[in-house]
Amino acid sequence: DPVIGVLALQGDVREHLIALAGLGVTARPIRRARELAELDGIVIPGGESTTICRLLDVFELREPLTARLRAGLPAFGSCAGMIVLASQILDGRPDQVPLGAIDIVVRRNAFGRQVDSFESDLAIAGIDGGPVRAVFIRAPWVERTGPDVQVLARVGEHPVAVRQGRVLVTSFHPEVAGDDRLHELFLSMVTSGERRPGT
Ligand code: GLN
């Protein structure tokens, strides 16, 4: 069975652990570099991306995590996790450095100018069985996508679920909606294809 880590520096770690455990995989909170070694995939939860980015440095996780991501470790980020995995952040703190695991530019708190939080039923490419209930809380949107990025869902013209290779990010929080189909999609990305060296 695959082992999935949930970065446990800040945010809704517990909700992701519960969703993953419900799908029958081994799910572990990750706080130390040595805990990265055995992972087949990692989730970056929702929360506060400025705090998570700062704690990546405090816990000396930035370098080893970046190395694993470069080597192909599958990753799933929700909301703040989308921001942390992005290549570039708009409306971030000047000292906020993302991990650059997916070729997207994100805008923080993008919907917040109109409305802080909302829910929506979203049709998501690659997910069967009807629309997914999507919970947005001070959510980012994707402002620009690189050529290898696939848009899976939009709100208006703005991408809110995108994928590049084995990295999946959503503006919303699948971990709080009681619908585990996004986690299932991520697990299919983890188990598909050959295992990478070092995993
Ligand atoms: N606004 C938060 C940030 O910029 C994200 C909010 C969330 O994860 N619900 O990090």
Image: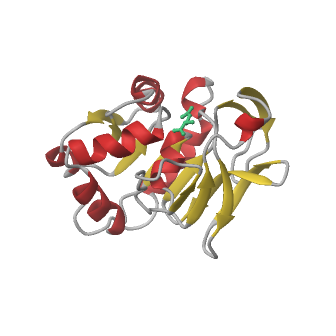
Residue 91 visible somewhere in the drawing: yes
Coordinates of residue 173 in the picture (x, y in percent): 59, 33
Q: In which quarter of the image is residue 122?
A: top right
Q: Which residue lies furthest to the front in this view?
A: 94
x 32%, y 35%: residue? 26
Q: Going by the image, does 44 lie left or right of 9?
A: right
* Residue 115 in the image: above or below residue 89: above
Coordinates of residue 50 in the picture (x, y in percent): 44, 41
Count of numbered badges drawn on the protein: 0
x 75%, y 27%: residue? 118
x 25%, y 48%: residue? 57
Q: Residue furthest right?
A: 156
Q: In which quarter of the image is residue 143?
A: bottom right
Residue 125 visible somewhere in the drawing: no
* Residue 188 in the image: above or below residue 117: below
**Quarter of the image with the C terminus in it:** bottom left
Q: Which of 13 and 88 is in front in this view?
A: 88
Coordinates of residue 139 in the picture (x, y in percent): 64, 38
Q: Going by the image, does 154 lie left or right of 80?
A: right
Q: Which residue lies furthest to the left in this view?
A: 34
